[in-house]
Image (cartoon, rainbow, N blue to C red):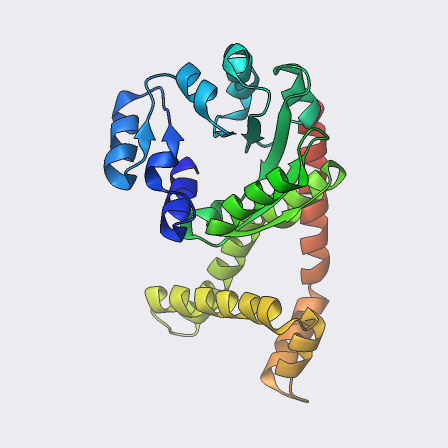
Amino acid sequence: MASAMISGLIKSQSVPAENILVFDRKPKTNSALHDQFGVTAMESANQLAAKADYLIAAVKPNALLDTLDKLSSHLRKETVIVSVAAGVTLESLASALPKEQKIIRVMPNTPCLVGEGMSSITPNNNVTEQETETVLTIFSQFGKAEVVSESLIHAVVGVSGSAPAYIYILIEAMADAAVLAGMPRAKAYQFAAQAVKGSAEMVLESGKHPGELKDNVCSPGGTTIEAVAMLEETGFRSSIIQAMQACINKSDALSKK
């Protein structure tokens, strides 16, 4: 995820490469990031914390709070801490940082890796509007980003964070059906994936309700309405809703541990 963010910023030319400071505990990773992107590799996490205006902590959730606690004495009051760790609340982040530290919680998803991510941006009360806009701009370089209240984070996990897995299952099932009808496997995946991508773009670009777009494809007595009727009969819509509700409930439970 860190590499995806760096790549997006470099491609957008919104930040000079040398102004992007990085540190990884593995020296080889630091060198590789410098060689690949031209970013500035720091000698220590403490040095990075002391210099960064926006410190993006791309650390596993179970190690994040301990890492921030160790860095806290090196942070400046005006530094904005950006966490991309799932399940770690603003309150938990604040407990590991100096009082009144600026904190933004971000929930990206894996399509960030191909520049088509969706990220929610949730600032605490110490962050200014301009600082929030800056983080929105950063995460918009590898997809789309929107400000979301923390009360909706679990919904974000369900509709965006975990959603790629649902779509992969849909693509796999569509391809299986095409293979059953005689299409070669590789071609089936290409047709199914492009159909999903194109349909998503239609929703985003047209501004039309998904139901209207669906209706436009369904000719009276045609093949598409036959398929839609079968999806309704077998509970496709209900299955998606129930799956997302299970995901949202699990996210809520994990955040309370």
How many numbered discs, if any? 0
Residue at the outermost bottom position: 220
Instruction: Say left or right for 253 vs 21.
Output: right
Instruction: Say left or right for 35 vs 257.
Output: left
**Which residue occupies the foreground of this view, 240 or 62?**
62
Q: Residue at x 62, y 44 (%)?
A: 120
Instruction: Say left or right for 234 vs 5.
Output: right
Res. 162 visible in picture: no
Q: Residue at x 72, y 49 (%)?
A: 242
Res. 242 visible in picture: yes
Q: Residue at x 57, y 17 (%)?
A: 65
Percent across and percent down for residue 218 are 65, 82
Q: Residue at x 29, y 28 (%)?
A: 29
Give the position of the N terminus as an image quadrant: top left
Percent across and percent down for residue 187 are 35, 69
Above-or-below relation of 122 to 196: above
Give the position of the C terminus as an image quadrant: top right
Above-or-below relation of 166 to 17: below
Percent across and percent down for residue 74 are 50, 13
**Which residue occupies the foreground of this view, 105 or 135?**
135
Percent across and percent down for residue 93 are 63, 22
